[in-house]
Image: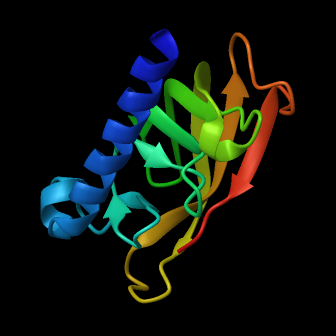
Amino acid sequence: MQRHKLKAAVLICAAASLTTAIAPASASTGARSPADAVIVDCFSHPQVRPHEFLIACGDGNSILTALRWSDWKPNFAVGSGLNVVNDCRPFCAEGTFHPYPVTVRLDRPEPLTKHSHQRHYTQLHLVFTDSRPSQMPKQVTYRLWS
């Protein structure tokens, strides 16, 4: 029963993310100045201090949720939340999603390709603060897209 509740919660989060992505950028990002660095989501929308962020754009098997940001600066951002990851057992469509507490750091801002006046973070660092997926190291770094 618990497995189905978590799976449903993740699907609802994914649907909410898609709905947010369809809304105008100003509605999903809040007010920001050109000096603010942004994080670009899977749908190429810039965001500031998002509550959720999909890491696995292709299959949705890894998402950051319940994000709370302690710092959002021009050169870095720091926060915490949950990395909800599908264990893909026996295969991804039948897998179970598990939440893992993480600290999050965004850095290495660069100009956005289509909006050179705007900078976006190009690296995402996660540190698992408790348990973690068996295939993952305690710390992982992802190169982000623009």
Residue 51: tell me if it is visible: no
Percent coordinates x, y for residue 52 in the rendering: 39, 41
- Residue placed at 87% from the left, 33% from the top? 135
Residue 121: tell me if it is visible: yes
Decide which of 59, 89 is in the foreground and name it: 89
Percent coordinates x, y for residue 138 in the rendering: 82, 25
Decide which of 11, 37 is in the foreground and name it: 11
Is residue 30 left or right of 21 when viewed as pictured? left
Q: Relative to residue 78, is residue 54 depicted above or below?
A: below
The mark total stands at 0
Quadrant in the picture for the N terminus: top left
Decide which of 118, 63 is in the foreground and name it: 63
Location of residue 5 (image quadrant): top left
Is residue 22 left or right of 113 when viewed as pictured? left
- Residue placed at 42% from the left, 89% from the top? 114
Is residue 43 left or right of 105 when viewed as pictured? left
